[in-house]
Image (cartoon, coloured by chain):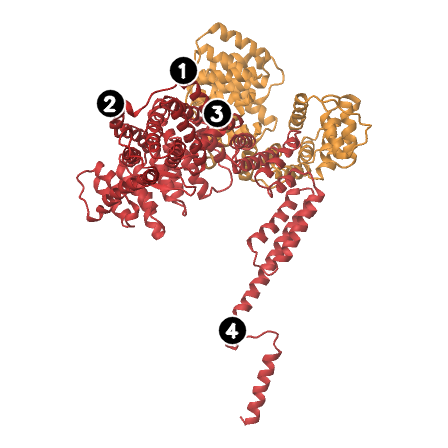
Chain colours: A orange, B red
Amino acid sequence: MGQQVGRVAVICALLMSQPTVAQEPAESVDAAEAERRGFQSLKVDQAKSVQWFEQAASAGRPAAQWALGTHYFDAKGEARDVPRALELMRAAALQSFAPAQSFLGWIYFEGTDVERDPKQAFEWFSAAARQEDAYALRMLGGFYGNGLATKRDPELAKRLVVRAAELGDQEAAILAYGGLLYGPAESRDPRLAIHFLTRAANANHARATYLLAREYLRGASVRHDPEAAVQWFQRSASAGNVLASLWLSELHFKGFGVNQDRAAAEKLLSDALTRASMQEKNQFAWELSVDEDERLRDGTLAVRVLEPALAAVTEKVTAHVDTLAAAYAEIRQFDRAIVVQQSAIDRAKRDRSPQDMIAGMIERLRLYESGKPYREIAP
Amino acid sequence: MSRWLQSLFAVLAFVGIAVHAEPVNVIDELRASPAPSARIKQIEAASRSAFDAALAEYDRQIEQNPYDIVDRLQRCRFMEQFVASYEYAGFIDDVSEEAERCRAALVEKYPEHPEVALWELERTYGDESLTKGAELLRQTALGTWTPGQSARLYASLARAADMVEKRDLALQYALQALELDETADVRLIAATHLIASNDKPRALAILTAPVHGSATPEVWSLSKKMELLAKLGARRQVISLHAQLRDLSGYDHTDVARALRLVGANDLARQELKLATETAGQYGSDDERELFRFELDLGSAEQALAAYDEWRNSGWMEDPIGINRFALFVRHPLLPWQSRDITGLLGFLGALAAIGLVCILPIAGVHYRGLAVRARTGEPYPTGGWRLRHAWIALCCLGMASLFALYTSGAVDVTATNDGGWAIDATNKQLGRISLIESLLTIGLLLPFGLLAASRQTLWGEAQWSVAKSFAVALAIAFVFRVPLLLAWSARPDSMQQLALDDALWQMIGALRDQFGLVSALWVVAVTAPVVEEFVFRGVLLRSFAVHLSPGWANVAQAALFSAMHMNLKAAVFLFLLGLVLGTLARRSGSLLAPMITHAAFNLIAALLLL
């Protein structure tokens, strides 16, 4: 829905820059004029805007149908009318109106307000993607990548995601970065990967700034530049990324890319930990435990972050236990690592986790048994 | 066979031929392969059925995806492109009509759809495109267009603005297109205008972005990209692009060599220039000339001589006054001369003679007019003051200074332009040097006149205006004459640079500024030119003419020569008027101070606006 909300935001921004007194809908105007006035009064007077859109939509104008559909879908309380929204969106989509096609793709994919229907979602995304809708292209990439409602085609999936990234879709840019830098060797293109990531980071995308900071820390596909990493982590943290705050604390602890300042580090850490979800703590601990680059590992901190958090929950997630074992292995407490990893494997088997996940965990257990910690190539 | 049977057979055969709808060559009947006309019909039928099959495929797609407008659009596009590509097909009229119907139906069904609007926009050019596109921009701002559609709109607008040379607009649209779609085919437009506005880092970033795009780059765009990268000094990228170009064919070797040379890849540049001379054939000698210039600057003596010989093989007109052979001599003095090099020397002497002859023509006119008047009035021929021979020598000095300056600049060509002006085919560096040396030579050659004037007070007459009055009047007149340029500048300040580049004289002055700095350009424009030209035209010429003609006609004659000397047909009338006013100013004020100030201020205003 982010795409739809984004479009309405564009309309609002436009209207804010052109304050115009909306005209009374009672006035008799043609459908095109009614649609124009609908957009014009969207910010000034939503009720009037809806009336104008109603008039234009009933005359079959797709942009008005889409705007009205968005209104009914996003409305709060009783005003929310999903069937009406769907009816309007479908009418616009059948007239090849790309934003409405994209909306239908999303709603049938999500399956929260309607019954999930990947096949229909695929068809609508395809039609919108043909008109170079970046969001639809990215979503379609997911369909082909996972073989959902169509034949699996990783190459086509990659090209769709890259195309979406070229068209400025930031999520697609991050996906493209991952695939082009860490995907299959034959399709790697580190320069293009970093280009997409930098573009999304420059737009202050919280995860993109975080990932770019990690790349500067690692120094494999860009120059090693801890100072730049700190700056990107700071931008990411400002955009609300807790992982970035956790990493900033670690860099302050180590004096890496920034002057060593244990007091500031402790403050950053305690602040971040109060906000961090279990998932974020787990990811931070995993990164600190298994990175190939020794400078970026800190098993002690990983244990310090994860151990109490895990102890506090009754229903433990297998992946989190797996991470704790990796953290013990990193600080060379292999006996504990083996015990914890075995419990993680038992849990995974009990929960019927995917076989490749269990195989990975068993492989790590073998490493711990032979006195070696686990290492992983980013990201 | 009996005779009657033979006759019957012949008749039947004749009847058989006659009943055929069209004549068939009987020789073709003797073999199994069909006649050419039958073959063509077969091909026609096959292409028709291939066309129908393609159309059916589109129809099937549309039936399966009725809400996919792109399928419908592709169907219409297919027919339009078929009409453009196979205009001689027998069924082309049918296709043409069907294509029109397809377009009309699509526009009627989806009148405001972005895809249809973009398609319609493709049918417009230049300013019409810009106007229609600007209307569409309002729609994209509502968020109802996809990023790809918006990017295509901005790209169309950038191309249209570029076509009508609205450079700032082209850059603005191109950057917006790239912001929306990194593969938008406007990188060259954006980079060209960024370089023109001296934003080189941004231009380099745009040209070297790692986005591939889907289309295979054409030879033209690769060459253009290479040229732009060369301007930015991106040696590694230029060489890499050259490797790509070499795998293709049909590119301009000389342009590519120029780009390679610009980044110092001289061996590769030499290879390309040699390829150019090998492939150009008898169609011209430009490539040979380029190779000579290259070898003169960078090659050994033998390489330079060999290149000169190859170029010179095209005829003596390649180097008519021997400038290039002289440049070769200056660079490699020990190289042997050839008998055919004498044509250059003869050309030089001919040019000197031509200068003398051209300068004597108006002087002779004045002389005979003076004689005719004296024959009537019986006045004696004057012997004091400035004489007509001084006027002739002064004019010759101006011409000779220009000619000699050309010989100091290395390999250059001087060519006439269609509008009656002249152009020097030389690098900016050479142009700068020519301008400076010409100004110094002119002063050197005219110095004896100056000393003569200083030694004979009678040559000047007495100043009738005070210095302050001379300044005030002179500056006011200069300003009045520059009003048109000032108005043009206030209307379009950005186009001044282009105005400067269009004129050969200002091109030289600009080159001088680039090479030796603004002070040297101002020295030539605002000091040397006013002092020298006023001394010659309003000093020597006007005063020597006035002895033989009435003051008014003397003024007209010097103004006409002043205008002619600038060799600029477009500005001829304007310069003539300026000459008249400067002449009047010299006569009224009684000295050259006022015209010199007017001339200096007149040039200075233009220099400050154009440089």
- Amino acid residing under circle 1: Ala
Q: Are marks 2 and 3 on the same chain?
A: yes
Q: Amino acid at mark 2?
A: Ser
Q: Is residue B355 left or right of residue A365?
A: left
Single out the mark in the foreground, 3 or 1.
Answer: 1
Q: Secondary structure at mark 3?
A: helix
Find residue B480 and name its label. 3
The dot on residue B455 is: 2
- Mark 1–mark 4 Cα distance, whole angstroms, equals 104 Å
Estimate the x, y position of residue B399 in percent, counting from the top left: 30, 36
* SS of the residue under disc 2: helix
**Nearer mark to the viewer, of 1 and 2:** 2
Q: Which numbered disc flags the more N-terminal residue, 3 or 4? A: 4
Q: Provide the residue designation for mark 1.
A: B468
User: Which of pointers 2 and 4 lies earlier in the amino acid sequence?
Assistant: 4
Q: CA distance from mark 3 to mark 4?
A: 89 Å
Residue A308 or A293: which is nearer the viewer?
A293
Q: Are marks 2 and 4 in contact (CB under 8 Å)?
A: no
For the residues marked 1 and 2, what is the alpha-carbon distance in whole angstroms?
26 Å
The picture places residue A189, in percent across and down from the top left corner, at 46, 33
| SS for dot 4 | loop
Q: Nearer the viewer, residue B44 or A4?
A: B44
Identified by mark 4, the residue type is Ala
Which residue does the image show at 53% across and 9% down from the upper left? A268
Q: Which chain is home to disc 2?
A: B
Mark nearest the camera among 2 and 3 is: 2
Marks 2/3 in contact by CB < 8 Å: the verdict is: no
Q: Mark yes or no: residue B209 visible.
A: no
Q: Quadrant of residue A312?
A: top right
Give the answer, above or below, for where A350 lies relative to B19. above
